[in-house]
Amino acid sequence: MNPYQVVSTLAERFAAEGGTVVRGRVRGRFTLHGVTKDIVAPVTVRLVPLTSNESDQIGINADMLRVQAEFKILLTDYGISVPSVVRLKVSNEIQIRVDLTTFRTQG
């Protein structure tokens, strides 16, 4: 699924639910170090509607859609080994955070 499909799907869900926050799960492909794997991650999407005051103050003329997700991976799953000299300080399991902000123009 491409990013544009994800944003379109989320926008449709906002319209259907009539809310400003939607939580769910997103499926995608994550590539690191030349290795691609399918992932499923919890996602939170916030719609921040534009107010006329904000438009005047910061010059943005669009609603903001913020998408946040977090998931854990194992470095070894992506062909990355932790050198023995830092093995006690660097974990094989790491947390990935995604924070995407996009704007939907009015009109």
Image (tube, rainbow, N blue to C red):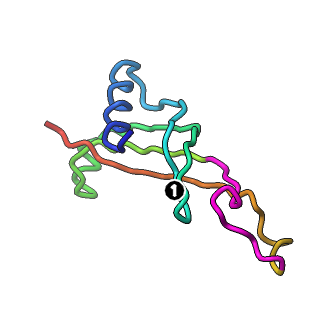
What amino acid is found at the position of numbered circle 1 in the picture?
A: Thr
Asked if residue 60 lies left or right of residue 21, the reply is left
Residue 97 x, y percent position in the rendering: 57, 54
Q: Residue furthest right?
A: 88
Question: In the figure, residue 32 lies in which quadrant?
Answer: bottom right
Asked if residue 57 lies left or right of residue 39, the reply is left
Residue 50 x, y percent position in the rendering: 29, 42
Residue 72 x, y percent position in the rendering: 67, 50
Please tell me which residue is depicted at 42% across the width and 45% down the height of the picture: 66
Foreground of the two, 17 or 55? 17
Q: Secondary structure at mark 1?
A: strand
Disc 1 crowd rating (10 Å Cα; few below 14, some 14-19, many 20+) is few
Query: Per the image, is 74 magenta?
Result: yes
Foreground of the two, 103 or 32? 32
Question: Is 39 located above or below residue 19 in the figure?
Answer: below
Quadrant of the snapshot with the C terminus = top left
Query: Per the image, is 64 magenta?
Result: no
Q: Bounds of the magenta span?
A: 71-84
Please tell me which residue is depicted at 22% across the width and 53% down the height of the picture: 56
Asked if residue 99 lies left or right of residue 14, the reply is right
Q: Residue furthest bottom?
A: 85
Residue linked to disc 1:
31
Please tell me which residue is depicted at 60% across the width and 47% down the height of the picture: 70
